[in-house]
Amino acid sequence: MVKTNGKLQVHVLSEIQNLKVHGRTTGQRAPLTLFWTGSAIELQVTGSELWVEVESDYDIYEPWISILVNGVPVSRQMVTAGRYWICVFRGMSEDTVKNVRIVKDVQAMSADSGCSLQFHALKSDGTFLPLEEKPYKIEFIGDSITSGEGAIGARAEEDWIPMWFSAIHNYTYMTAEAMNADYRVISQSGWGVLTSWDNNPHNNIPDYYGQVCGLLTGEKNQELGAEDPHDFESWQPDVVVINLGSNDGGAFQTSGWRDPVSGKVHKQRLNDDGSYHEEDLAAFEDAVDRFLVKLRNTNPKAQLVWAYGMLGFPMMPAIYRAIDGYTKRTGDRMVSVLQLPDTTEETIGARTHPGELSHRRAAETLTGYLQGLMA
């Protein structure tokens, strides 16, 4: 017969004062909805045992979570549909203080309006203690690379499923840890600054940046607050890292996208010699400029760093031109470009995306650069 712990007490999240919520979300804590990859709850807790009450739903893509105890990943699991308790740890020393972070490992799934992950309560025989504030805040904006697609799993894996996403084996988490920073991620596989990889102009990050998680669709997500305006004053980053451009470059290589409503075909074109069409390249540069304006308006004191190159860097000249033009026009000197190390045969991961080693090399490069900026 399993021995149960009679000292366990249930605490709904809205009643726990010493609880840190990572990632954009609404003010609702009963329950708390985690939208973006890397979103998490973090706590300092004593006691021998800790459980979390989760609620998950999905039509296609199930959520995954990673559990970290004292900064070390100790568990990673699929969160199947339903509402139930998951044991975080048990049998630990009662008086020892444990730092616990429960992380949403998978990106916001724009292709699955039924996908959601919520936390209702914690159950423990310990006490929740205050967390120290970290000296920096970093926001990461990107695509599949920043979502950690392919950062975990064998190189042979090609299935597009949540299992191969990781928020932990990821340059965002690694950089934040090295910088001793809190961080947030805004990312979506296949999306770009101007268009997605398949030339869909609606699938661009800037259009949704002002919302909590506006790229999610359906009545359910609307009710959860995904389309609500984001309160930028509630969390002002010291640095915004933008890792976009890979899919905009890919759009030049793929077929046109036909709008099912208007019938109009959108296509980033190549010239006969294989170079980028001048008008389409200019449209990309204009999109970069407009996004920088939006980022500066919403993050007035942040360093803006366009960090790009983990899957090649064909758009780098256009990014340089766009940022140079923006800087000259606005006088904003807190904007810069950083080329990240390209993924190699040695560092590639699942789904021909950067693997953990590629993410680690990118994090080292980015950390060194940010340390210089923040010195």
Image (cartoon, rainbow, N blue to C red):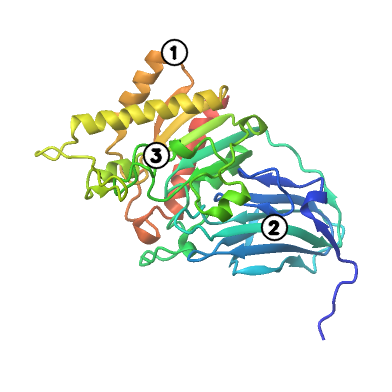
Mark 3 sits on what residue? 244
| Residue 147 on image: x %, y % | 47, 50
Q: Secondary structure at mark 3?
A: loop
Q: Residue at position x 64%, y 51% from top?
A: 40
Residue 227, image quadrant: top right
| Marks 3 and 2 close (CB-CB < 8 Å) | no
Give yes or no for contact between labels 1 and 2 (Cβ–Cβ under 8 Å). Answer: no
Give SS at disc 1: loop
* Cα distance in 3D space between marks 1 and 2: 44 Å
CA gap between label 3 and label 1 equals 23 Å
- Name which residue type carries label 3: Leu
Which of discs 1 and 2 lies nearer the camera? The answer is 2
Given residues 358 and 84, the one toward you in this image is: 84
Distance of mark 3 from mark 2, alpha carbons? 31 Å
The residue tagged 1 is: 331
Residue drawn 60% across and 69% down?
81
